Image (spheres, rainbow, N blue to C red):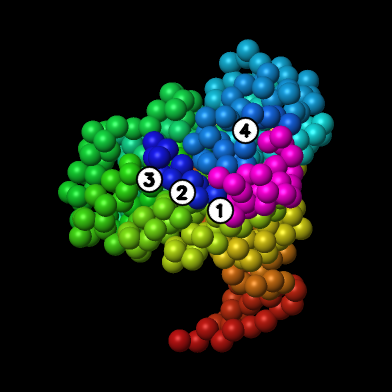
Amino acid sequence: MKNEEVVAEHRETDEATSLEPPSYHPLFPVSNRSADFLKRHFPGSTLKDWISWPWQVKNSFTSVDQLSTFLGLSESEAATAGSDVQLPLRITPYFASLLEGNDPFHALRRTVVPVIQELTMSPGESEDPLSEMDHSPVPQLVHRYPDRVLFLVTNFCSTYCRYCTRTHIVSQQEKAHSTRKQWDVAIEYIRNHPEIRDVLLSGGDPLTLPDSRLEYLLSQLRAIPHVEILRIGTKVPVVLPMRITRSLTSMLRKYHPLMISIHFTHPDEVTPETAEACNRLADAGIPLGSQTVLLHGINDTPDIYKSLAHKLLKVRVKPYYLYQCDPIPGSSHFRTPVESGLEIIRNLRGFTSGYAVPHYVIDAPGGGGKIPLLPNYVEGYDGKDLLLKNYEGRSFRYPDYL
Ligand SMILES: *Cc1c(COP(=O)(O)O)cnc(C)c1O
């Protein structure tokens, strides 16, 4: 862990911790809400601690009992204590500061606080719905598509989403970053497969690795001539935004072309802290996309998704994918009808910037990969005239004569 680095970066600002208002910090924004949360729940700690990401990881909430100190728990939340809910509980203090209160239907709270419904299996659900294990030529690698691979570099996340597609992997061993030896097997596979031109680092969350370990991966992969682009999938800018340090971004920019997909769920996640993290990454020349899982009662209306898309564009994040929720065990309280997703796309296309419109996809159970779903804009043919409907529902013809 590059603790020294984080400490060094903050050293020059020791005196900043005593400045008023408490939200002021020259190195990273801290909202008044967070500063207030810090004062009440970590009375011995300072703003300088708060903006240190190792402090955030070390002080994360990992049990229902701890949550009860700042959340009025509902019956179904409290019932998870001592139950055999699979996925570990882990919430950073930063993200916890966005959840406070007594409303169990609070959108962000529902994404990270377990409920007893997680133990209810429903028809169609399975441990590994995407059959990633069947497409794994070596451990930690999923090679489903012809020219790109998914490299699961760690099991650890700083905050676990309750609808996690990889619950079966993540729940095996909390806090296990992989060893270099395990990575090297996967890197060797990529080196021996010249058709792989795109490597997507995911997990777990790759940005929970210390800079030096992440740089090992990026430099090894960048040294392979046929690997054209590198990508990272992460939720860190949303749940641990202070992880996006200047030293991280100056390391990352050495490995271009590098893209980052950020897992955003709800407009309330776009805070001053998250905006700073995204802007730093964008300033390092990293194209940013968002991946969002459609979740019942959380983001499954056109208004909420549109608000998220607009907020994301303002922090230079392109809405990339909107996913139908995967049928993992105990996910029925999160899943929505496919029609809700189509309705969202129908309400975006034409009504707002094309940049705000994501691809709505189902990652096909059984390992079929991502399959796009579109509202029906094609009505058929009249002779060689293609009959089309526009976003307003008006009919048009295109002379498809060639
Ligand atoms: C999503 C995914 C990718 C990347 O897909 P893109 O459409 O290129 O973003 C690659 N491999 C696997 C196994 C995936 O699930």
| Residue plotted at (74% across, 50% down) | 21
> Is the residue under label 2 in contact with that under label 1 (CB below 8 Å)?
yes
Q: Nearer the viewer, residue 73 or 372?
A: 73
Of tags 4 and 3, which is closer to the observer?
4
Give the number of the disc on residue 9: 2
Q: Residue 45: which numbered mark, if any?
A: 4
Q: In this view, does 135 lie above or below 125?
A: below
Q: Dot 4: few (<14), some (14–19), or many (≥20) neighbours within 10 Å? A: few
Closest to the observer: 91 or 188?
91
Find the magenta span and give its range: 14-39
Residue type of the residue flagged with mark 3: Asp
- Sequence-first tag of 4 and 3: 4
Is residue 202 among the parts visible in the rendering?
A: no
Q: In which quarter of the image is residue 389?
A: bottom right
**Which numbered marker is on residue 211?**
3
Amino acid type shown at disc 1: Leu
The residue pinned by badge 1 equals 27
**Which-is-in-front pick, marks 1 and 3?**
1
Q: State the SS at label 4.
A: loop
* CA neighbours of label 3 inside 10 A, class few (<14), some (14 to 19), many (20+): some
